[in-house]
Amino acid sequence: MMMLMCASCCGVAEVDDVKLKDCSACDLVRYCSDECQNDHRPQHKGACKKRAAELRDEILFKQPESSDLGDCPICCLPLSLDRNLSILNECCGKLVCVGCDYANLKREFQGRLQPKCLFCRQPMKKNVEERERNTRMMKRVEANDPVAIYEMGVFRYEEGDYEGAFEYLTKGAELGDAGAHYLLSWDGVEEDENKRVHHLEEAAIGGHPDARHNLSSFELRNGRMDRAVKHAIIAANLGHDISLGFLKSAYKVGGLVGGLISKDDFAATLRAHQAAVDATKSAQREEAEAGRRVM
């Protein structure tokens, strides 16, 4: 059995009464104390930085199971990337698909029932004033609901209260909301490019397809073609049309990224994209969209 040693020159080994701690950035080496870690930093810095970047890329380029929107909590089908096809309930902060919302409205109309939230069954009032909507939303904000905090940030931004929007979005990002991270990456909101890229990466890791597409564009502008293609493939696999269009152009005409996506990878991406799009479809949702067009 190999004995674990402190990476510094002190010679301390990990035994029953001594526990070494990993380097928090790279996990390559261990230290017996903060003093040894500080003494060893000049020798370890290069390898640590390289390994930390590799670990970050492992997380960054992992295919998310779904988009940041997740599934409709009623029909359990993935929500469409088109945010106009989801309804936010202010009372509980839940996003539901238009299909389930439309079916519920039709059921209530036909049965002459009192309107209620489709998820939490809270009674809903007709013609609710904006002030009351904000009161409902603030209750969710006070409960540290990331979706509500994100929505309040968007509301403040649209009102022109950029300082208030930044505060809400920052809090939402701290709670892990991918949409909040994405909005914090916008020009004029976060002017530090390193921070902007960090927010884009966090949003992309959380399954935000637009953030992933923007990362692809960022890498393309900086000449890192292989990374640009990787990001585009992940976004396209989530059903992102623009990213798929970029990959089609790259595959068909070559251009700047010619040869960086193989025939097999491109075919697999086409199948994954179609599967992601098909997964968001249902007869109920199509009926709702048809009803909207008539209205």
Image (cartoon, helix red, strand yellow):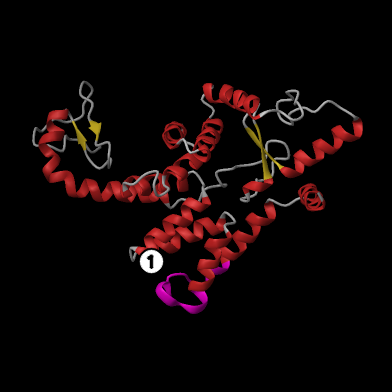
Q: Residue at x 55, y 64 (%)?
A: 244
User: In the shown orientation, is residue 170 left or right of residue 101?
Assistant: left
Residue 231 horizontal/vertical position (percent): 45, 58
Look at the image and tell me whether residue 263 can be seen.
no
Find numbered disc 1 in the image and state the secondary structure of the residue it sits on.
Answer: helix
Q: What residue sits 23% from the left and 38% below the top?
A: 2
**For residue 289, side relative to residue 215 (left or right):** right
Residue at (60, 60) in percent of width and height: 273
User: 85 or 29: nearer the eye?
Assistant: 85
In front: 232, or 7? 232
Residue 140 sits inside the magenta stretch: no
How dense is the environment of label 1, judged by Cα within 10 Å: few (below 14), some, or many (20 and up)? some
Residue 260: in magenta span: yes
- Type of amino acid at the residue the image marks with label 1: Met
The residue lying at 87 percent from left, 27 percent from top is: 113
Residue interval drawn in magenta: 251-267
Q: Which residue is mark 1?
A: 225
